[in-house]
Amino acid sequence: MPEPTQITVPPNLLPSDGRFGCGPSKVREAQVRALTEAGTSLLGTSHRQAPVKSLVGRIRSGLAELFDAPEGYEVVLGNGGSSAFWDVATLCLVRERAQHAAFGEFGAKFATATTRAPFLAPSQVITAPPGSVAVPEAADGIDVYAWPHNETSTGAMAPVRRVPGSREQGALTLVDATSGAGALPVDLAETDVYYFAPQKVFGSDGGLWVAIMSPDAVARAQEIESGDRWVPEFLSLGAAITNSRQDQTLNTPAVATLVTFAEQVDWLNEQGGLAWASERSATSARTLYSWAESRDWATPFVARPEDRSTVVGTIDLDESIDATQVITALRANGILDVFPYRKLGRNQLRIGMFPAIEPTDVELLTRSIDFVVDALV
Ligand SMILES: *Cc1c(COP(=O)(O)O)cnc(C)c1O
């Protein structure tokens, strides 16, 4: 058996771009060019002055357009990424008790954050094994229902629909859309907070969170922050809302991240918006899953076809093939970051299928994998 690093995939089987990671993910050349062009006008200039503020404004209005935000919904942003937003939401959006549907690492992390908060009742957590989907259920005493749109650690995607009766109960619906936002269809009216970070679908860098918030969610933050709960300013949603309304962030943002983010939002809108982006990822997903189903040594990890993510594909390999060797051989050929989520611990490949990734490259990736597997066994 050859050393994985000695395997050479023929150039005609190689994707035009080898980046298939699930975050950070492929940055398009046009985004990098935008960064170069911003080199002397935006980079290295104050985020409190008109040029950077208008960049933030472009992102906010571009996202409202991309998601067809209902009347009154606001695009709010702050520093710290989606993980920081879990703490922001724990402090500023959960009144007494949250319910989480958790079916992977990311959903579970937010559940842990609210459960550990000493000022909240222990959260109700509805779980499902990795590779399947758990959905929230109406329950008394719940004021926040939360779940991920796309569970990046397992490649399962969930419906975004309010729990029946949740609005009458006065509960908010919070959806972690970090890896799905911008490439999965969504009706924001089914959510109060649809939040994400720009290093996945938007092909930018990490470190920023964005939350598209309903008037009910804004009111909840105001209610909680005017009460006696201590909220550190950095985690204050009220402060983020105030700053966002002025196209600013509480503290200094990474201007380069804003530039590549804005470029991608404009690109998605110009290409045909969310419908176009969703279809492009779905095309890649059809290629990937049908390929896996046609190989006797590969199986889509997510059992139910309707739960299979169209942005993050997870493919289990037969135990006779060591996924680590496949991943090593692919990396030696410039195909990067197709490893599974580390804590999942499966003999698996995980493949980003974000809109920036050419569907034809996903097809070529499958041919490269075929070649590597043939060479290894
Ligand atoms: C990547 C990811 C996160 C974490 O995002 P950070 O910006 O790194 O904190 C949270 N939730 C989901 C679903 C993710 O895919």
Image: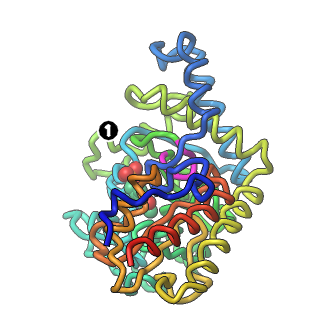
Residue 99 seen in the current view: no
Depth check, front residue: 128 or 338: 338
Q: Position of residue 6 (x, y in %)?
A: 35, 57
Q: Which residues are magenta?
A: 199-203
Mark 1: give few (<14), some (14-19) or many (20+) Cα within 10 Å. Answer: some
Q: Position of residue 207 (x, y in %)?
A: 39, 41
The type of residue carrying mark 1 is Phe
Which quarter shows the N terminus? bottom left
Query: What residue sits right under mark 1 in the picture?
Result: 234
Q: Residue at x 56, y 78 (%)?
A: 308
Q: Position of residue 130 (x, y in %)?
A: 39, 82
| Quarter location, residue 325 | bottom left
Q: Position of residue 47 (x, y in %)?
A: 48, 20
Side (left or right) of 122 relative to 41: left
85 relative to 243, above or below: below
Residue 15 seen in the current view: yes
